[in-house]
Amino acid sequence: MIHDGLDEEEDFHSKDRKQFRKERRHAQETDRSKFKKTDQKQAKAPIDTSLPRGRVVAISGEGAWVEGADGTRRLCTLKGLLKKEKMHAKNIIAVGDFVRFQDDSIIQVEERYSYLSRQDVTGRKEQLIAVNIDQVLITTSVVDPALKPALIDRYIIAARKGNMHPVLLVNKIDLLQEASEEEREFFRAFLSAYEPLGFPILSISTRTETGIEALRSLMKNKSSVFSGQSGVGKSSLINAAFGLSLKIGDLAQKTFKGSHTTTVAELLTLPGGGYCIDTPGVRSFGIWGLEKEDVTQHFTEILEFACDCKFPDCTHLEEPHCAVQAALEEGKISPIRYESYRSLLAEAIGDIDNWTRDKL
Ligand SMILES: Nc1nc2c(ncn2[C@@H]2O[C@H](COP(=O)(O)OP(=O)(O)OP(=O)(O)O)[C@@H](O)[C@H]2O)c(=O)[nH]1
Ligand SMILES: [Mg+2]
Ligand SMILES: [Zn+2]
């Protein structure tokens, strides 16, 4: 059976599905998915500091695993106050949440300072991947599976919407040697388009240990979430950098599309300081609450040409006398980035004809 990996979390959250949907609709209408700390603040009752504090480290079909201050983990259910409080919550709880608990029940969830979310499989519901995390390690591989810049752009936008720093990891750099000239050229073109954007990019390999030290220092004393397609090497990277033994994919399964080695997100405490969350691979990544401004803010190097377009409201998708399309033809704009812009803008403005969400 093809398994998305986050299904168990969905089961857990679906217990109050009807009520949840109603609340989600409300939240979507009021909070256009911009990060608004104050909205969440208003929705929360004061935290009962007399209760023990813990952190959600994993979510399964049975409930949430909460790690207390003494390091012990317990399986908790949601009861009491929390149910009344979830009006403005995105999910009820997510990995990374700081909670107050009593016996084996979560009573309250603290305000979140950041989140990484996506659309669920139906596209109608927001699915939180991780919360209260500093940076998203957007993990890709140079080949096998192929580099997907459009997916990277989606992650960058989602990370920034949720107040997390995006970091780009390009794993399996060892495979570049035996890659085709076309694949090598694509990687060069990718780097020249994305390096000027200013996000950290690490070319890395668990096989040759290239970049592992840099990854370790980038993660030191911070909290990070690894996210990306299945099979790019997220779990392998965590193992290589921190000497852990997370389950990694079998090469024999490689051709079996849809096989996911990591099946639940888990928060890990790192030796040397910091935290990281390993997550199940995604097949596609729909940004929750995507708006036109999210897209235009992310493609500034493309839109700097827009002032010479004939129509002031030009979308640069197909209008005549478009300076952006002219710049593209003259090689002044990266075709990789432009393709990504097209797909994301079309999705944001609801232009179905141009909408090509990258199915992986
Ligand atoms: N050539 C090469 N293969 C690698 C590298 N890193 C990981 N792999 C291989 O890639 C495959 C997938 O690795 P995983 O770590 O399980 O990938 P993942 O991203 O955690 O996958 P999911 O848990 O399914 O999301 C395994 O066969 C690894 O041995 C690398 O740097 N180079
Ligand atoms: Mg994994
Ligand atoms: Zn234009």
Image (cartoon, rainbow, N blue to C red):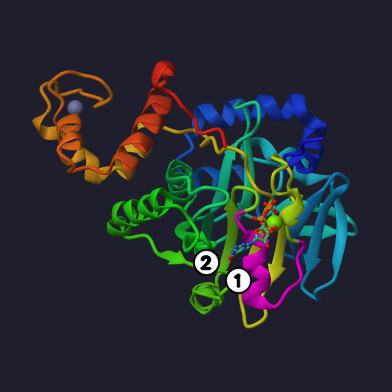
Q: Residue furthest bottom?
A: 272
Can residue 174 be seen here? The reply is: yes
Could you say which quadrant of the image residue 310 lies in? Answer: top left
Can you tell which mark lies on residue 74? none
Residue 174: image tag: 2
Amino acid type for the residue under numbered disc 1: Arg
* Left or right: 19 as drawn, with respect to 221: right
Relative image position of residue 233 (x, y in whole percent): 62, 59
Q: Residue at x 49, y 73 (%)?
A: 218
97, above or below 327, in the image: below
- The quarter holding residue 334 reads top left
The numbered dot on residue 207 is 1
The answer to whether marks 2 and 1 mark residues whose Cβ atoms lie closer than 8 Å is yes
SS of the residue at dot 2? helix
Identify the residue shown where x is 70% and y is 78%: 243
Residue 52 seen from this side:
no
- Residue nearest the viewer, comparing 184 with 274: 184
Q: Give how far across and how far down residue 265 sits, in percent.
A: 71, 54
Residue depicted at 37% across the width and 39% down the height: 294
* Residue 66 part of the magenta segment: no
Whether the residue under disc 2 has CB within 8 Å of ligand 1: yes
Disc 2 or 1, which lies upstream in sequence? 2
- Mark 1 beta carbon near ligand 1 (under 8 Å): yes
Q: Where is the N terminus found, in terms of image quarters?
A: top right
Q: Position of residue 272 (x, y in %)?
A: 63, 83
Above/below status of 6 relative to 244: above
Q: Quadrant of the C terminus?
A: top right
Which stretch did the figure color magenta? Answer: 232-247
Q: Is residue 240 magenta?
A: yes
